[in-house]
Image: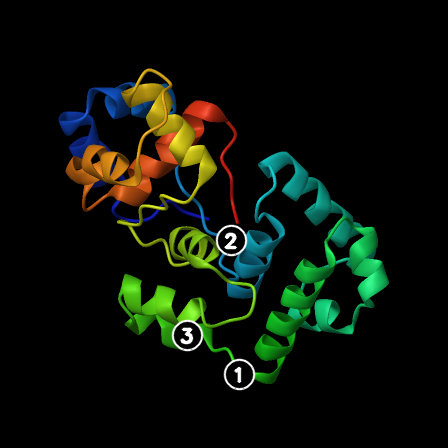
């Protein structure tokens, strides 16, 4: 796995524009966003991670791997709901994962076609899938598509990091966060990744 080709340029430009990001980029030198290169797994991991901590999501994923040997459209589609629930998934998440697995297995979802879509068009297409909201779609854009300018303002970690570094720990409104993030364009995915690192030094990979 290699860092996106734009990463060095993005870090140079962000460090020149923003003192907070300059410090974070220097602190985490040598790390970068990595994609697993698997569209189904990225979507599945994002669904598993909805509304729970990164640590809890990884624990559930590890249990899925232990039970299924590999998380693929076929293994998820064929697994029983009780087995998937025993790994820590809610009934709704089991339903969402199995629906997406069947769509991938049948060819109804074709990730190859998504590369031609711009960010908002792709988000619009993804949120039409059962269980995929805007946050999940944005995680897919960042971690599978490696799109450089995604700003997932619904992400609790990003909200916490912006509040901590730019507003002395006090909550900020969405317009306030958007205003702070304006100078980060067109590298808002990269800025987000470094702000996540300020809360958890271990890189997250979906």
> How busy is the neighbourhood of tag 2: few (under 14 within 10 Å), some, or many (20 plus)?
few
What residue did someone put label 3 on? 112
Question: Is 19 or 123 nearer to us in this picture?
Answer: 123
- Residue displayed at 19% across by 25% down: 18
Q: Nearer the viewer, mark 2 or mark 1?
A: 1
Up the image or down, 186 lies above or below 191; here it is: below
Judged left or right of residue 29, residue 68 is right
The mark nearer the N terminus, 2 or 3, is 2
What residue did someone put label 1 on? 108
- Residue displayed at 52% across by 30% down: 202
- Residue displayed at 29% across by 20% down: 167
Residue 31: image location, x then y, percent? 41, 32
Q: Which mark is residue 18?
A: none
Report how many numbered discs are placed on residues in the image.
3
Judged left or right of residue 3, residue 94 is right
User: Disc 2 vs disc 3: Cβ atoms closer than 8 Å?
Assistant: no
In space, the residues marked 3 and 1 are separated at their CA atoms by: 12 Å
> How busy is the neighbourhood of tag 3: few (under 14 within 10 Å), some, or many (20 plus)?
few
What residue did someone put label 2 on? 36
Residue 112: image location, x then y, percent? 41, 74
Question: Is 142 or 89 nearer to us in this picture?
Answer: 89
Indicate the secondary structure of the residue bearing disc 3: helix
Up the image or down, 67 lies above or below 155; here it is: below
In space, the residues marked 2 and 1 are separated at their CA atoms by: 22 Å
Q: In the rendered image, which quarter is residue 59 located in?
A: top right
Residue 84: image location, x then y, percent? 78, 59
Question: Is 106 or 136 nearer to us in this picture?
Answer: 136
Residue 138: image location, x then y, percent? 40, 54
User: Disc 2 vs disc 1: Cβ atoms closer than 8 Å?
Assistant: no
> How busy is the neighbourhood of tag 1: few (under 14 within 10 Å), some, or many (20 plus)?
few
Residue that protrudes farthest toward the top in the picture: 168
């Amino acid at each position: 796995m290699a860092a996106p080709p734009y990463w060095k340029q993005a870090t140079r430009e962000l460090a020149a524009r923003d003192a907070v990001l300059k410090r974070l980029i220097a602190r985490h030198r040598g790390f970068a966003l990595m994609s697993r290169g698997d569209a189904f797994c990225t979507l599945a991991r994002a669904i598993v991670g909805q509304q729970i901590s990164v640590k809890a999501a990884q624990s559930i994923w590890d249990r899925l791997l232990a039970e299924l040997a590999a998380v693929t459209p076929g293994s998820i589609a064929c697994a029983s709901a009780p087995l998937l629930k025993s790994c820590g998934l809610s009934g709704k998440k089991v339903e969402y994962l199995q629906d997406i697995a069947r769509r991938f297995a049948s060819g109804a979802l074709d990730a190859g076609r998504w590369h031609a879509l711009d960010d908002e068009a792709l988000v619009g297409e993804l949120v039409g899938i059962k269980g995929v909201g805007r946050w999940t779609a944005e995680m897919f854009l960042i971690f599978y598509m490696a799109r450089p300018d995604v700003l997932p303002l619904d992400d609790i970690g990003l909200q916490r990091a912006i509040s901590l570094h730019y507003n002395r720990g006090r909550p900020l409104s969405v317009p306030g966060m958007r205003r702070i993030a304006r100078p980060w364009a067109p590298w808002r995915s990269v800025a987000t990744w470094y702000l996540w690192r300020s809360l958890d030094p271990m890189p997250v990979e979906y």
